[in-house]
Every structure is written in structure tokens, then in C-alpha cells.
Amino acid sequence: MLPWVIHALRSSGPCGAEAGYLPGNQELLPVSGALSLASVHPRMFKEYFQYKGISFPRLIYSEQGLREVENEFQVRDDDVFNVTYQKSGTVWMLEILSLIHSNGDPSRCRTVPNWDRGPWYETVLGLQTARSNQPPRLISSHLPIQLFAKSFFQSKAKVLYTVRNPKDVFVSLYHFAQIFRPYKEPGQLDQFLEQFLEGDVPFGSWFDHVKGWMGLRGHENFFWISYEELQQDLRGSVERICRFLGKQLDAQAMDGVVENASFQAMKQNKMSNFSLAPRFLLDQTHSSFLRKGIAGDWKNQLTTAQSENFDRVYREQMQGLELSFPWDELSPQPSPPPTPGGS
Ligand SMILES: Nc1ncnc2c1ncn2[C@@H]1O[C@H](COP(=O)(O)OS(=O)(=O)O)[C@@H](OP(=O)(O)O)[C@H]1O
């Protein structure tokens, strides 16, 4: 969701020497000189628009761009899509895929920003980058399946879908929304939790997103993996990803992928940690984009009541999806009360 920020920064130059553009709904706002808050209409910050029932921040997306992605974008058979619900490990998978492509050599990851290596094609400027990148293209997306490029469904392009414990997604999003200016302030955690569970956040409902994409299970061009599996066994996960991509890495190349896709390596890489984003858009003073990088942080952030409420909605929403996720055993369905006289 950040790529256009950096495009704006890049096109205005690090010292703001050239004119850049910030995307808006109706028009592109010219930004001359150094980017500053004064350059952007205050209305553009923290305002969402609805596209087919899903909220998008106006500062980054446009109705026209979303229509183009859905109806006109030409997917190529050799495209690889990195798809997630936000805060599920998008930039991690982007790094892994970049490193697999370069046989574990980190040079490109250290010199080309991740938003150029794997642009989020639903953003205004990400779409331009995706169109102009040379094949084979790596493209990132948070779009729910119903808004994805229609041409994908007639192609042999591959989708890798990363899914994460929604409680950790929620916690990560709660912190991110406090530092990312295009997003509305999340307010109290309790209130934001209600919005999240109702799908009243950008990209809509986590439940709908996951159920929608999981409908592609079994298709040969669809692969899914969890953030938790990446955490538990990164090397084994990379091997599975390589098999899906039809790519063979020798042991040295595999070492290169695993080492350079670690949380610490990515945190130190300015092409991956968003430290190049202008502070008035992403202020990493009090919290970072690469914040904790762990599974299960929700236990530190949610009360028992909040967690139980989450579990209740989760069970309602996910019933019927015959699929178990690594976190399911962490929140088992409460056993029914013992029947009188039963053993
Ligand atoms: N290498 C690596 N290892 C472990 N965890 C990692 C890694 N890279 C990113 N992350 C964590 O992923 C969270 C950000 O998710 P996304 O990249 O999907 O964010 S976004 O939706 O594209 O804005 C965010 O999670 P939280 O730390 O829980 O906030 C990142 O820290």
C-alpha cells in the first residue's frame, strides 16, 4: 500500500529537485519541490471512497485505477502475483520471491526498492510500474478476488497467497493505522476491533478475502502458505515455493534467500524497510513498518474478552470452509457442556 509514496518521493528527487505527482481521485496533484503537507489537499488524507462495497484510501487509489486493473490490465502467463490481505506478510513474500528470482543474490534487493520490484498494481502509481516492468513480472496485491484483474482467470499466471492469523493481522493493522497517514486514525482498540470484524477497514473483510481466494485451492496456478509456516520453517517454505514456481536453487542460493529474507536483514535494508518514505506519510518514529515480525503478538494486545469475541466471529464466518490453519488449534472451539449423565 505504500508504493506510490515512494514514487512521489523518487519523482521529486531526494532533495525535491524535480516535480512529482501525488495521485488523487479526480486528478494528479502536482508537487513541486520537496514534498510537504502543504502540497496535498488535507481532504485527501484519511478519506476513503467505496469501490464495489470495499473501502480504499483516496490518497493512494482511484476508482479509475481500480476499474482499469479489473477490466483492462493484461495479465501475462509468466506473471507471478504476491497476494495477501494487508498486514499478512506481503513485503516478506515479496522479498522471498525477489531473492528466489535472483538465485539468492541480494544485490537487487539492496538497490531496487521493493515497490518497484513487486508493485502493488491496484495503487495509482503501482499500476504504471506493473505495466512498465519487464517480464517476468512480480506483482503484489491486496485486492479481494472479485476485484482482481479479470484477465488473470484466463491466464497461466501464478498466484501465491499468504495468509496470517487474523488476530495478528488486526494487531499489526492497528499499529500501522497509527503511523500511515492515508489511513483513518484507528482510535481505541476496542472500537477498531469492531470495525475490523465487520470488514469496515480498507480492503474489506479479512474473512471474505480469505474465503474468496481460498476458492482457488486445487488450481495448479494457485499456491497458499501461512505467515506462521514461514516463521516456523523458512527454508522448507522456500523449497515449497520453489517447487510451485518450477525453480531449482542450489544450497548456496537457498542460504542467500533465507538469510536475506530474515526479519533482521529486511529491517536493515532501506529498500525493504520503507525508511525512504516521507515522514508526513509514514512516520516510523514510534512504531515501524517492520514492527515485531512475530506470530502470536495478539496475546500481548487483546484482552480475554476481545479474544473470545474474535473467536466467536471467526467461527461464524469461517464455518463450512474445510481447511485448517496453523492458528486454529490455538483457539479451539469450546467443548459443549457435558450432557447430564454423559461420560
Ligand atoms: N522477514 C519478516 N519476518 C517476519 N515478519 C515480517 C517480515 N517482513 C515483514 N514482516 C511483518 O509483516 C507485517 C507487515 O505485513 P505486510 O507486509 O503484509 O504489510 S502491508 O499490508 O503490505 O502494509 C508486519 O508485522 P508486525 O510486525 O506484526 O506488525 C511486519 O513486521
Image: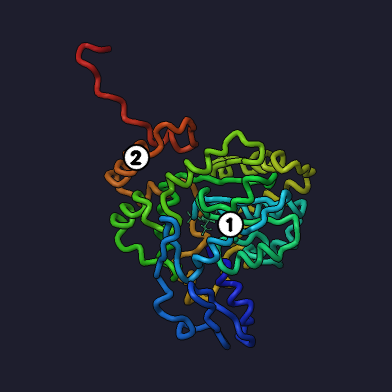
Report which quarter residue 95 is drawn in: bottom right
In the picture, the disc for residue 179 is none
Residue 238 appearing in the image: yes
Say if mark 1 contacts mark 2, CB within 8 Å. no
The C terminus sits in image quarter: top left
From the top left corner, tell me how far across and down residue 61 is, in percent: 50, 66
220 or 271, which is in the foreground?
220
Which residue occupies 38% across, 52% down?
199
Q: Is residue 39 above or below residue 172?
A: below
Circle 1 Cα neighbour tier, 10 Å, few/some/many (<14 / 14–19 / ≥20): some
Which residue occupies 59% across, 72% down?
6
Alpha carbon distance from label 1 to label 2: 37 Å
Residue 172 appearing in the image: no
Q: Secondary structure at mark 1?
A: helix
Which residue position is annotated with label 1?
Answer: 71
From the top left corner, tell me how far across and down residue 142 is, in percent: 53, 55
Which residue position is annotated with label 2?
Answer: 311
173 or 302, which is in the foreground?
173
